[in-house]
Image (cartoon, rainbow, N blue to C red):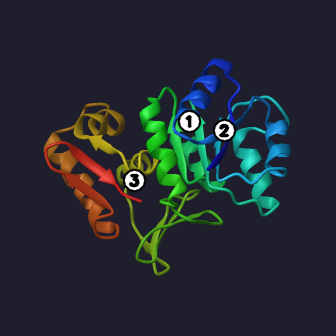
Amino acid sequence: MRLLLLEDDVVLKDSIEEFLSSQNYTVDSFVNSEDAFDAIFSVDYDLLLLDVNVPGLYNGFSLRKALADENKNIPTIFVTSMSSADALIQGYAQGCCDYIKKPFDLTELILRVQYALKIHCYKTQDDFLILPDNYRYNVRTYELTCNSISISLSKTESEILNLFLMNRNNILTLEILYDKIWSNDVDPANARVQINNLRRKLPQDLIKNIYGTGYRLDC
């Protein structure tokens, strides 16, 4: 498997490249987006790992869009320090199949790479994430639909869903949920009610209850 890594932090770039190479991946690394863009049209890559804020004509998001415009739809993971919901939404809108936030453990990175290479990622269609059972989530308007019928989400439910999408295939502990969604200002029983309300609006078992730990949204 051949991967392209775009990362302008040279120390981090070298660390990621060395680690992935030790896992028997072939890695071509770049610090400049234009060099990466040119390489993608010269080499067949199985996966792109793109930092967002990088030197060159493109940032990671616009590079992914430029590739899609040229019908280069290569599985892409954005690797970035940007952690806002807006950044997540923009990333998925550009067709990424995963999004990993810095700082991260290299073990987490390899797991996400393996998932992406096995095509365990949601397909995108214009501004939509395509979910199981004819569900679709509009990444711009935060609208959830099933068979084109709108499913109402409260503001909190949208925030919970966005957090799960940002951390899919990973367990979100109750402590993380309490912190990220409610800034620890919530009754645990009320938090569980709101999470379960969201789960009932989604395809069955999309968000799994990991007994005694938290929840996980599975691809």
Contact flag, marks 1 and 3 (Cβ < 8 Å)? no
Contact flag, marks 3 and 2 (Cβ < 8 Å)? no
Q: Is residue 85 left or right of residue 152?
A: right
SS type, badge 3: helix
- Estimate the spatial distance between the alpha carbons at disc 2 and disc 1, rounded to whole Å: 7 Å
Most extreme residue toward the top is 11
Amino acid on which the number 2 mark rests in the picture: Val
Amino acid on which the number 3 mark rests in the picture: Leu
Amino acid on which the number 1 mark rests in the picture: Leu
Quarter of the image holding residue 149?
bottom left
- The residue labelled by disc 3 is 161
Quarter of the image holding residue 81?
top right
- The residue labelled by disc 1 is 20
Total labels: the figure holds: 3
Which label number is shown at residue 27? 2
Q: Residue at x 25, y 53 (%)?
A: 194
Residues 131 and 152: in front is 131
The picture places residue 105, in percent across and down from the top left corner, at 44, 29
Contact flag, marks 2 and 1 (Cβ < 8 Å)? yes
Q: Nearer the viewer, mark 3 or mark 2?
A: 2
